[in-house]
Structures are given as C-alpha cells and as structure tokens.
Image (cartoon, coloured by chain):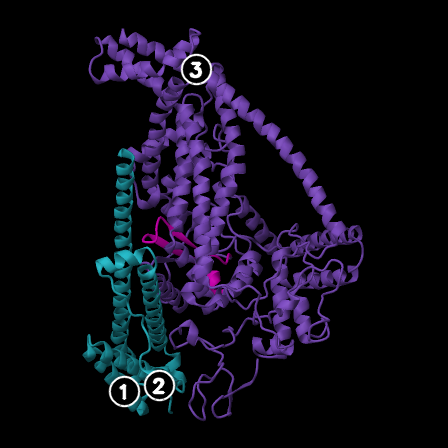
Amino acid sequence: MAATIECAACGRANRAGARFCTGCGAAIEGAVLVGRPVTPPMPAHERPTVPLEQPAHLPATTAAPAPPQERPTVPLEQPPQNASHAVSPPGDTLAGAVLLAGQGVVPSAAVPGFDAALRPAAVQTAAAMSTVATPAAPASAAVAGAALPGPLSRETFYAAQRRYRRRALLLSLVCAVPVLALAILVAALISPWLYLAAAVALRLLRLAGPLSGPARDLALLIDGLGLPLKEGLHSRPVQTGAVLRSAIGLLAPSIALIVLLWLWVRVLFRHAATGGTLLRLGAREPKPNDLEERQLVNVVEEIAIAAGIPSPRVLVLDGRGVNAAVIGSSHTDATVVVSRAMLDTLSRDELLGVLAVLAGSAGNGDLGLANTIVSVFQTIGLVLAGRDFLFSGVARRTVWRFLGFVFHNHGSQEQKAARAAALSELMLRSATVDGLDDDPNAPAGQSKSKDLGWLGIITVWPYLASAMFRMFMLFYENGVTGPLLGWIWRTRRYLADATSVQLTRNPDGLAHALVRFESCYTAVPGGGSASHLFVVGQHGSAVPPAAALQLRDAWRAKAEQLKGKPLPERLAAMRAMQAELAQRVQAAQAADPALAAASAQSKAGRGEDTFKDELGMHGLQPPIDKRLRKLQALGAHVDAPSKLHSLRHASLKARALVFGLIGLFGVVIVGLLGVAVGLIVVMAAAFNALLALPVLAIALALVEAALR
Amino acid sequence: MGIVLIVIAVVVVVLVLGAIASYNGLIARRNRVRNAWAQIDVQLKRRHDLIPNLVNAVKGYMQHESSVIESVSLAREAAIAAGDNVQARAGAENQLTQSLRSLFAVAEAYPDLKANQNMMALQEELVSTENRVGFARQFYNDSVMEYNTSRESFPRNVFAGMFGFQDAQPFQLDDPSDRAVPQVTF
C-alpha cells in the first residue's frame, strides 16, 4: 500500500489512512477507510470511487478486471487474441500477469477441496502483483491500455431482481403440476382404504337398524359411484361419462383430505422446524461484553432497517466453519445465525454483504417458500405412512409419533423442538424409497420396529405394492420434482444476491466475501438439514493453502507447456497431475492429523441426513463461480473466472467429438432409463390396481349389504 | 342475448377485482412509505439519546476541546427543539452530524480516549446509528420509488387518480451546501 496519500485540494502528502488533510482540512479523495467509517452510507450516485476497504491483516482481494476484449477463456488451441488491441502480451507486464492469474486451466473438481483452495491463491497472487504495481484498481486498468473495467454486460439490480422473481414464479407454476400429479396419485392409493373404512362403518351401522338420513345418503352415493365397476363385472356396456364421474368421486374426498392435512401440517411444523434446527446447530446468544459480537448485532439491525423487516434474532455459532444462515418460518420470525469464525474472517463491508443476502432472502419470503415445499413432502410422507400402517413398523412409528405430537406435546421448549425435528425427519423419510425400512443411520436408542413374524405373509402383496410405488416415487422425485425444486431454489438464491446489492448498494462486499468463502472451511456440524438456508454451500478444504498455491503454479506451467498439443496428450497429462495431487493431499493429511480430522468432519457433514438430497433437490446452493459472474454483471470488481470448460474456442473436431459422445451416451442412457421407469410405472400401477380393486369390491359389497 | 350479458358481467367483475387489488396494493405501499419516514425519525431520536452519554465520556479526557463539545450539545438541543418542522429539523440534524464529525476528528488525537472501552462502545453505537439513519433514508427512498412507480404505471394509474393517491417525495438533500464536504478545523 502507498505510504502517503496526496490531498486533491492542496496537494499535500498525508499519511496513509488519513481521512482529512492535515493542511487544508478537506476530505481526502479516494481515502482508504481503515476501520469503521463514521459517515453514513451514501446514495449510489454520490458514492466516490474509493478502493475497497482492506482489513490490515489480510491481503487485498481485488484484482484488476481484465478489459473486455481479453475476457479470459480457456484457449485450447490458440494463444489469447490480443495483438489487435493496445495491450502488451501476457507475461510481459504486471497487467499481463494479472491476466494470466485470471485465466489458466484449473483442474476439474474431481479432487475435493483442490478447486476451492486454488482460487484464493490465484486471486491473492493477482492481488499481490496488482498492489505492488498500483494502489488502486482503476490505475492498473490504465496500465493495461485504458480500457473500461467490468464485463460487457452490465445490468441494474432492479432488472436482475425482476428477472429472477419472474423466473422463480414461472418455475413454481411449472413445478406445481408434477407435485399435484403426485398428490393425485397418492390420493388414488389411499382412497380405496378410505372407502373401505366408510363401508365398514356403514355396515356396522346397519346392524343397529335400517339406514336413514345422512347415513343412507352416503351409502347411496357410494353405491352410485360403484356402478361402472358393477356393470363392468357383469360385462354390461359402461359409459365413459359414468366412469369419469365415478373416478372423480373416488378421488375427490382423498384429495380434499390430503389438502387439508397439508395445510394443517404446514401450521403445525412452522415453528417446530426452526427450534429443531437451531438446537442441532448449537447456537448461542452473542456475548454482551464482546465488542465484535455487539457490532454484529448492530449490523444485523442496520440491514434489517434497510430491508424493511423487523430485526431478526442474532445467534452466534462457535466452531471452525465460516458460514451464516437465516432460519425461521417467515420474515417476522427469523433468526440469523452467524459463525464466530466468520466474524474473524470477513471485513465489515463483506460481513454487511453477507448479512444483506440473509436479510434479503428473509424479506423476499424464501423462508415461507422453504417451509411450504418441505410441508408438501411431509404430508405425502405422512399419508404414505398411514397407508402402510398395517405392515411396516416404521410407518406405525411415524403415525404414532405424529398423533403424540398433536395431542400430547409436553415438556420444555427444547424437548418439544427436538421431538418436532425428529418427527419431521421421520415424515420426510417416509416419503422416500427407504420409508418402509428402518433407518440404518438412526441414532442409537431409537427402538427398532418389531418384526411381524408369520403374519408377514399376508402383508406381502400390500408391501410389494407400496414398495413399487416408492420406487416410482424415487425416479419421480429425482427426475422431475427434484431438479425443478432445485432450480427454483437456486433462482431464489440469485435473487437474494441481487437483493443484497440493492440493500448495501455495494456489490463488492458480497463478491469479496464469496471469494474468501472459496478458500475457507464452511462446513457447519449439524447444519445438514438446513443446508439450503446457509449463505454458501458447505465444503471443507482438505489442502493447506501453501501447498495449493504450489500445485496451482505447477499446473499452470504444465498448461503452458501443453498448449497446442493434441487432446489425448493433454488429457493424459492432466490425469497424471490429478494423481500426483491426490498423493500430495494424502501426504499432507498424514503429516497434519488436524487437517485430516477436519476433512473427515467436512465429509461427514456432507453425508449427513440432508433430506433435500433424499427428496432429489439437487444442488441447492448455486456454485460460487456463477454467483460471482452475476455479481460482476451487477458491478462487482472481482476476477470472476469465465466458464472454465467452455468449448467455445475448441476446434470443430473437438467439439464434434465431445457433442457426439455426449449425444450417443445420452441417448443410450435416456433409453435405458425410460425402459426402467416404464417398467416400474407399469408394475406399480399393476400391483396397486390389483390391490385396490378387491378392496373397492369389498367396500361396495358392504355398502350394498348396508342398504338392504 | 344471454351471452352478451354474461360477457358484460364478467368484464365488470374483472374490473371491480382489478380496482380492489390496485387499491389495496397502493394502500400497502403508501403505508410502507409513511412507516419508512417514521423510521428515520426513530433513528434520529436514537442519536439524540446517545449524545449525553457521549459528552459525559468525552468531557473527562478532552478538557481543552470544550468548544467542540459545546457545539455538539447545542446542536442536539436545536434538533430536539426543531420538532416536526421539516425544514428546521433537517437543517438541525445536519448541523448535529457535522459537529459529531468534528468531535470524532478531534478525538483521534487522544489515544487514551480511543482506548477507553466505554468510548469504543459509544463510538460503535453512534456509527451504527449513523448507518441506521442512512439505511432508513435508503429504505424510505426505495419505498417511495416503488409507490410512485406503482401509482404511475398502467393500469394502476387509472385507479390511483380515482382514489386520490398522490406522489410521494423522495428524501433529498435540498440545501446544496449539505452536499459540500464538511470542513474540519483543528
């Protein structure tokens, strides 16, 4: 950093970090605001172009953004095209070195943590080089040829927000269709049993005397519904209108029941989920005598004012993970959980950006959306558990626990929260393919379901029917609803990022925080089930930064060597490097047991009971690369890497080869999947229909008997 | 004949529903604007309440800077006295901001004072309050923009005129001298 700063008004040299000139008293233009700024945040049009606030103990994370003409892409064949522009070739000048830092072949994320460890080293090197050159970002752009910094496509955050909101709404409408279809299918599953129950009740009523009044009307109604079935059995012609009416009549009560149940479950678990998650995270109140934690509370309240939401509760997490989440049922009932490590790692601007993401997310209604989505699957799980009540111990346990929760909920807040969390887990698990069997990962102490013994024989058919349906649901959830829900949630995360820019009017804060997250250990133990509510995906870096830097340089040198060589040779060399990297990671972990422990913990955290993964909601957190690119479009000065594996500059042959292979394998896989899914659908339908028809027939017979 | 009646009825129903939705939307946004304006007042009052503590903490260390301390206290009293008169209040609050800045600039030269825990906590609170005032103004302006846009865009502007909704004024620095950088004299 420069030792002195010149005053714009009188030209006197002041010490670095001074805000006011000691000669004339004017505020120093471009003053580096070290420490907390006293001035309130200025509106965007008055904001001076200051370099970003840099905490004393960490290197600057700015990097000169490459001029648009040299936006780094992965040049597989040709060297970067810059001869036509007034910029020196890479490697000759510092700006060129910065360019190199921005581009470069980064290995695939096959080795965990390597990718994460690489990026900050790249940025740090770039920053070191750029700060040696000049103290301010625009200046180095001037060195590079006076081209405008920033990407070609800029947009306002209002436009970005509008776009994401519209997209999320559209996706929600699209996603409602398969979810409704699933609900109708589940309704079709349970309606025979409902009608059987009604028929048995009516028959028993008949024992007391001939039916009259509403009971008789009900019996007549059911009898009428069964008309097409009876006519079909007697091989008389059946009218389609009658079949349709009877199908609707069969499904309507169960659909109504499911909808009502869903609304009820939504209300029941609204506050319960919050308590359970917070308990599992083990968050604590902020210490009143710790200045940083008081500052955190103040910052959260400030950003809540900017967002227009009531100030959320603030809790602090101890531990190694650098992450934060907003947990709650709505924007009026939110809790912000920030890890202590994040307070130590991020500067005030960056912290503000991160908290603004959380506040924006809460203000946009993401909490209610998450609650709704989870409650849909909870309801489906509960209904399926009810159906499998007779022959599955887990289903029985789920239903009993649910009834206990509704009617007999007592104990301390903590006990209630824990119970609600466990019940929610059970219900969600019941909606998946494992729902019929005991959870092998269940904590010790949970009673195993009792075996039915010889009674199990008569339950074979319904068990098979249920298992087939769950298999179908596996494909359905992972293939249809899962990706859609994941897409919706990722869009809401982008919306939260854009809202953060709106609230702070400073995209750099969040961008720099994200860059820093890539090199940090962000896994939080206990945060598996709420992973979608955290500000960044949970990962751990298994490689120490120094080693990562070395490896990155070696890799880059190798990439330079390989330029112009044919594709197979490049692939072989990359594979060799990956093997070497894996070896080095193991050596590093062997040398430092703490690192190995942390890596294991992060892996365990990833494999935790993340129900969203079970329900197929893939990739809930958008990749940091993409978030950085979008923030760059909003104006952040950050060296966001372009799409690393872009084939745009690859030769036609390479492109044809890749697309041809993808196409071929894709067709084969889709074909196989289609056959498998088709088989499963047919079998599930057959099993369940063959189960439903006798049940319906018995019900109708009982009703007929009741009417006589 | 029946079809025509039905179509007219549907159109009327749609219009009425649209009017209701527009009205409710405009009401909600206008109330948010009013609430945001009140929020600015809340944060400014918070600042008023913090200043006596600040003056007490600073007095012991900065005996030679009584003029600066005086100006802060006087500015605070003027701001409280200005009350609801928007012009006078705005001017008084700006004066208070400037005197606070002078005070903090002067306090930089007293390392004992800066190290004092009490002073650090107070400084943090005042910084936070300034940020809150800024954010409250930002939120007010955002709400105003949302309300005005909603009021002026079609089809809501049709109903807005009928129901008598006025444009709201964003928070601006009316006095050009407020945009000038404050001069700090030592």
> x and y percent of residue A477 in the render?
50, 36
User: Which amino acid is tagged 3?
Assistant: Leu
Residue A348 appears in the rendering: yes
Cα distance, mark 2 to mark 3? 86 Å
- For residue A34, above or below residue A532: below
Parent chain of label 3: A
Residue to which mark 2 is pinned: B102
Q: Amino acid at mark 2?
A: Ser
Write the residue at 39% across / 68% down.
A295
Examine the image and state in which quarter residue A592 appears. Answer: bottom right
Q: Nearer the viewer, residue A682 or B98?
A: A682
Q: Quadrant of the C terminus of chain A?
A: top left
Q: Position of residue B94 (x, y in %)?
A: 30, 80
Q: Are marks 2 and 1 in contact (CB under 8 Å)?
A: yes
Which three-letter amino acid code belongs to the residue tagged 1?
A: Ser
Residue A587 point in image, percent of width and height: 69, 54
What color is chain A drawn in?
A: purple
Which is nearer the eye, B181 or A14?
B181
Magenta region: which residues?
Answer: A321-344
In the rendered structure, does residue A331 fall within the stretch colored magenta?
Answer: yes
Q: Is residue A202 magenta?
A: no
- Specify whether A558 is left or right of B93: right
